[in-house]
Image: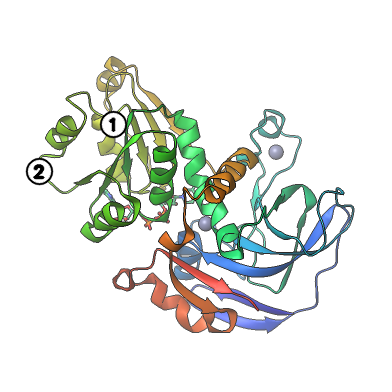
């Protein structure tokens, strides 16, 4: 079968490999779509911490279930599926607490182990997710959107709340969608005017704020009737943005870090204390989030056309990959098709 391997930063190589063998409790998927995400781009650039090469990238996947070695009867061969690409141990404290998304020895497919830039991939049967009539495009978008759905669920967003989402990349856009679906008044913040315009035009976000403006706090007060946002969610991964956003919380607010950075966070303890603030991280997503995303897609509340800006066939990935790193090309989601 055909595979594409990131052999070292900056280098992708097509290689013929043997078909994978099917271990017990595993299913074989014929891959049909591969969504490209920031993690893949950073791995290619060589800026993804702790990344080991060579590695087959790709974790936003959909395809056909070819066969299963011990499948539960409700999965049919030939069925369109996606899967939860965070392979967990099943026995650690997180797994026992129904938090497989933060398993102590989590292996993310396409990050810690080889992923989906292949014709055929085997995955644990328990990671499979029914396609439920969605297209391969939609199914490959479920994972990145589930990250946002999980962040919104962590915050327990209530109808009518003002939710400030900082960072309008693919992850932040998903957070905005699921905050809206939860009934929130969404405020989008970024430093990139193109991305803020995208939020207004494509996602109908009513309020946008440029983080570079001198009067950000005043703008937030005006939007929230002086209260400030009761939920703040970071999707920048910028240390500066993360530290800065503590001041945007209303008293009693929750702050959820979906974005990730390598340094330490610091904030004023008295400011944090007087608000009785809650700070949380949000890692990956669970089956509940995947199901919520699929239902929202089926109900037409989230549309793949909003996200997919670039399309290529598998044999073009090597040549096109570098161009997706250039912000001038306006990539939100590049989608690879395998025929
Ligand atoms: N929680 C998880 O499991 C999970 C999963 C995937 C990605 N992530 C993280 O989510 C974050 C976002 O991912 P993405 O692919 O959307 O990234 P992205 O780089 O496409 O988007 C980040 C956005 O933040 C904006 N930004 C940067 N600095 C800012 C600042 N100071 N103020 C306001 N906006 C600022 C950028 O302009 C950009 O639009 C990353 O940190 C990524 O590592 C987390
Ligand atoms: Zn991803
Ligand atoms: Zn575990």
Which residue is the site of mark 2? 214
Residue 259 visible, this orientation: no
Taking the image as shown, residue 329 lies to the left or right of residue 212, namely right
Quadrant of the image where one finds ligand 3: top right
SS assignment at label 2 = loop
SS assignment at label 1 = helix
Q: Nearer the viewer, residue 316 or 54?
A: 316
Taking the image as shown, residue 23 lies to the left or right of residue 84, namely right
Give x and y (percent) for residue 66: 80, 66
Q: Residue at left 47%, top 38%? A: 151
Q: Nearer the viewer, residue 316 or 21?
A: 316
- Give the quadrant of residue 54: bottom right
Which residue is the site of mark 1? 246
Q: Residue at left 74%, top 42%? A: 89
Q: Quadrant of the N terminus?
A: bottom right
Q: Residue at left 41%, top 45%? A: 177
Q: Residue at left 82%, top 49%? A: 74
Inter-mark Cα distance, 2 to 1: 17 Å
Whether disc 2's CB lies below 8 Å from ligand 1 is answered no
Give x and y (percent) for residue 105: 67, 43
Residue 106 visible, this orientation: yes
Give x and y (percent) for residue 59: 60, 60
Q: Residues within 10 Å of mark 1 (few under 14, many from 20)?
A: many
């Amino acid at each position: 079968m055909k595979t594409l391997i990131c052999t070292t930063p900056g280098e992708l190589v097509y290689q013929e490999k043997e078909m994978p063998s099917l271990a017990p409790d595993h299913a074989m998927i014929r891959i049909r779509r591969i969504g490209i995400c920031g993690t893949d781009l950073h791995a290619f650039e060589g800026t993804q911490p702790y990344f080991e090469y060579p590695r087959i990238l790709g974790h936003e996947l959909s395809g056909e279930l070819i066969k299963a070695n011990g499948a539960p009867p409700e999965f049919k061969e030939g069925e369109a599926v996606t899967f939860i690409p965070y392979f967990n141990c099943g026995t650690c404290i997180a797994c026992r607490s129904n938090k497989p998304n933060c398993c102590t020895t989590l292996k993310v497919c396409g990050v810690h182990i080889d992923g989906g830039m292949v014709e055929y991939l085997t995955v644990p049967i328990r990671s499979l997710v029914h396609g439920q009539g969605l297209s391969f495009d939609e199914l490959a978008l479920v994972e990145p959107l589930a990250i946002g759905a999980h962040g919104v669920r962590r915050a327990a967003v209530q109808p009518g709340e003002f939710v400030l989402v900082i960072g309008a990349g693919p992850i932040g856009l998903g957070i905005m969608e699921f905050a809206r679906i939860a009934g929130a008044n969404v405020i989008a913040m970024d430093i990139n005017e193109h991305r803020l315009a995208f939020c207004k035009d494509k996602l109908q976000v009513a309020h946008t704020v440029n983080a570079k403006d001198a009067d950000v706090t005043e703008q937030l007060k005006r939007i929230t009737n002086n209260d400030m946002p009761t939920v703040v969610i970071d999707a920048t991964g910028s240390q500066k943005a993360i530290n800065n956003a503590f001041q945007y919380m209303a008293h009693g607010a929750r702050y959820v870090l979906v974005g990730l950075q390598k340094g330490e966070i610091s904030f004023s303890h008295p400011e944090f204390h007087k608000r009785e603030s809650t700070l949380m991280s949000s890692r990956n997503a669970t089956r509940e989030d995947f199901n919520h995303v699929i239902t929202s897609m089926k109900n037409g509340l989230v549309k793949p056309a909003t996200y997919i800006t670039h399309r290529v066939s598998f044999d073009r990935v090597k040549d096109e990959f570098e161009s997706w790193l250039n912000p001038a090309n306006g990539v939100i989601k590049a989608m690879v098709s395998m025929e």
